[in-house]
Image (cartoon, rainbow, N blue to C red):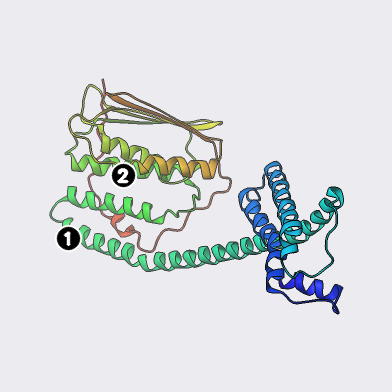
Amino acid sequence: MLLGSLMEYATNPKSYNFSAADMLFTHLPNICTVYLSILVCKKWAKPLKVLPLLIGLCIAYICSFFNWFFTAYYIRPLINANGAALGQIDYFHFGITVLWVFVRYAVFGFGYYYASETIEHERKLRLIEKEKHEAEYAFLRAQINPHFLNNTLNFFFAKSLPLSPELADGILTLSEIMRYSLEMDKDDRLTLIEEEIAHINNVIKINQLRFNNKLEIDFNINGNTSSVKVIPLILITIVENILKHGNCTEKTHPVKIALNINDNDIQLKTWNLKKNGPKELSSGIGMENIQKRLSNHYKNQFSININETELDYNLELTLPYNKVINHQEKPTSPDHLSFMQHFQLAQIKPQPYTS
């Protein structure tokens, strides 16, 4: 409104007469143009939809045309307006004039929209950066817990060794499980599949101790595992789901876990009966998390197929083959219970079912 009044004053300063009604009603169509342009941009500029955006601008121009027509020929004669009185309407020239005014004020609408979007984008970036720093600080603070856990396991292992080799071996296995889980970053970096297999064996072993070696699990590995890498904690999550929801004590129908590695891909196939009786509460986050991580890392180069009935559960996972050249051993954690390896303990291994 102020801009329009200044332009009118600059055009004819001697005859210019300030009028609040003239300022309001004369520039009301321009105000409508600005806000209609903002509305059209909010609807179809992000994400950009060219055809709806153009149609929206045409509708906004038509609204501006009728606003100006009504204002010029029905309102301005009733108020003390600046400028000469309008004569007989020429729709073509009137439309061209309105188009020029529309373009001029639509630019204000576009500018406001994109300026506000830029400010909002910067605000979100700052918020994300702040959350990232807070997460990093929280992670650093949480590092006290793994240190405490490993130190405690050291103490329990040393105290239990003279009393029960089986208990000491269970603590050693638990320490290996916790060390591997805590060492794995959450950015989907690759790990040697041999380490993942060792982790799976440790999880099966600790569950055998829990269930007094009554679990019937066939875990078979075919192919060369040397220097092959996968993203961590994918295979183990599938195995943990079997241990949680599957019937793992049926001698005639043992759990089947087959890991096949060839030059083209890595395949994990599992089969298990379902548990009878009440089901354990489950959020389903485990499998959902697996699929998200696989999608983020392998894009569309993997496949996962699940066949589930009322009695059994069958899963097939195929991953691309990644082989590392000139692999260097990953440094171990300073809290790794390496001193335990000096003790000779009777190893308790899962007893697979054999027909």
Residue ID at (83%, 63%): 85
Name of the residue lying farthest toward the left: 163
Q: Nearer the viewer, residue 49 or 69?
A: 69
Left or right of 74 in this view: 90: right
* Among the 4 quarters of the image, the one containing residue 182: bottom left
* Among the 4 quarters of the image, the one containing residue 23: bottom right
Q: Nearer the viewer, residue 180 or 227?
A: 180
Q: Looking at the image, is 231 positioned above or below residue 34? A: above
User: If you read the primary sequence from the N terminus, does the residue marked by circle 2 or circle 1 appear first?
Assistant: 1
Residue ID at (71%, 61%): 75
Labels 2, 1: front one:
2
Neighbourhood count class around disc 2 (C-alpha, 10 Å): few under 14, some 14–19, many 20 upward:
many
Neighbourhood count class around disc 1 (C-alpha, 10 Å): few under 14, some 14–19, many 20 upward:
few
> What secondary structure is found at the residue carrying circle 2?
helix
Q: Looking at the image, is 253 positioned above or below residue 91? A: above
Q: Quadrant of the C terminus?
A: top left
The residue wearing badge 2 is 202
List x then y, in percent, for residue 234. 42, 42
List x then y, in percent, for residue 127. 51, 65
Left or right of 96 in this view: 184: left
Residue 48 visible somewhere in the drawing = yes
Left or right of 30 in this view: 350: left
List x then y, in percent, for residue 148. 29, 65
List x then y, in percent, for residue 354. 26, 23
**Amino acid at circle 2:** Asn
**Amino acid at circle 1:** Lys
Name of the residue lying farthest toward the front: 78
The residue wearing badge 1 is 159
Alpha carbons under labels 2 and 1: distance apart: 21 Å
Residue 228 visible somewhere in the drawing = no
Residue ID at (70%, 55%): 67
